[in-house]
Image: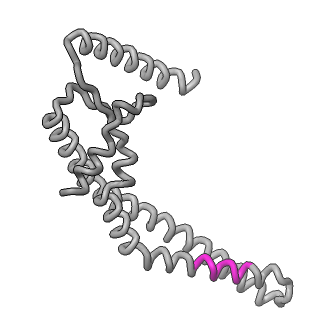
């Protein structure tokens, strides 16, 4: 069975339910709708940019060490490709290259895992702050419904700029 079919079924059911809820919500008198592009909030808010700078500083030395390891491997590979090595030298360089590749992959995986964990920790606070600002904005400006992460929305409902501006003034 195609793996996309169950997913598609879930999406269609969710869409149908959403349309049903929207229909009843409209019937109940929803007056003001809003939409938030969370990806823009995560890219453009000062808090997001500050998080990115913090992470870059925190992990820059490890990125540089990984890059140095990569360059060292390339140099050993070029030496091997030159064909100017004796049998013993060639064998030594093959072993060294193999060890460098193993070390690079191990360190790269560890760095990626640690970076993602730290990024997720930092962005959790950003998400909480953004949600707090959205709720405050909704109450203050009388929104009946605010949506996030939709497939399509008319730009007249997009209030992302106001959310980012509100977050940046805090």
The overriding secondary structure of the stretch rendered in magenta is helix
107 shown above or below 146: below
Quadrant of the rendered image containing residue 132: top left
Q: Residue at x 57, y 79 (%)?
A: 69
Extreme residue toward the front, this view: 156
Q: Give the camera-side residue of 1 and 151.
A: 151
Q: Give the camera-side residue of 143 and 10.
A: 143
Quadrant of the rendered image containing residue 74: bottom right
Instruction: Give the extent of the magenta segment.
Output: 69-77
Tell me: 154 left or right of 160: right
**Quadrant where the image shows the C terminus:** bottom left
156 shown above or below 118: above
Q: Position of residue 123 (x, y in %)?
A: 30, 54
Q: Position of residue 15 (x, y in %)?
A: 40, 19
Tell me: 165 left or right of 99: left
Q: Give the camera-side residue of 126 and 166.
A: 166
Q: Residue at x 53, y 21 (%)?
A: 5
Reply yes or no: does residue 80 show up in magenta.
no
Q: Residue at x 19, y 40 (%)?
A: 137
Tell me: 105 left or right of 75: left
Extreme residue toward the right, this view: 83
Q: Give the camera-side residue of 107 and 127.
A: 127
Reply yes or no: does residue 75 show up in magenta.
yes
**Quadrant where the image shows the N terminus:** top right
Counting labels gives 0
110 shown above or below 159: below
């Amino acid at each position: 069975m195609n793996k996309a079919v169950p997913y598609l079924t879930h999406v269609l059911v969710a869409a149908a339910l959403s349309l049903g809820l929207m229909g009843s919500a409209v019937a109940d008198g929803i007056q003001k709708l809003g939409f938030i592009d969370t990806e823009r909030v995560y890219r453009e808010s000062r808090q997001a940019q500050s998080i990115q700078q913090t992470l870059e500083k925190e992990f820059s030395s490890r990125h540089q060490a990984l890059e140095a390891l990569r360059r060292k491997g390339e140099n050993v590979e070029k030496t091997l490709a030159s064909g100017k090595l004796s049998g013993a030298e060639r064998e030594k360089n093959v072993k060294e290259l193999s060890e460098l590749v193993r070390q690079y992959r191990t360190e790269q995986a560890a760095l990626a895992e640690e970076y993602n964990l730290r990024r997720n920790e930092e962005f959790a606070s950003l998400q909480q702050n953004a949600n707090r600002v959205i709720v405050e904005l909704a109450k203050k400006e009388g929104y009946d419904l605010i949506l996030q992460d939709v497939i399509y929305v008319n730009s007249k409902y997009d209030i992302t700029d106001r959310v980012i501006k509100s977050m940046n003034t805090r």
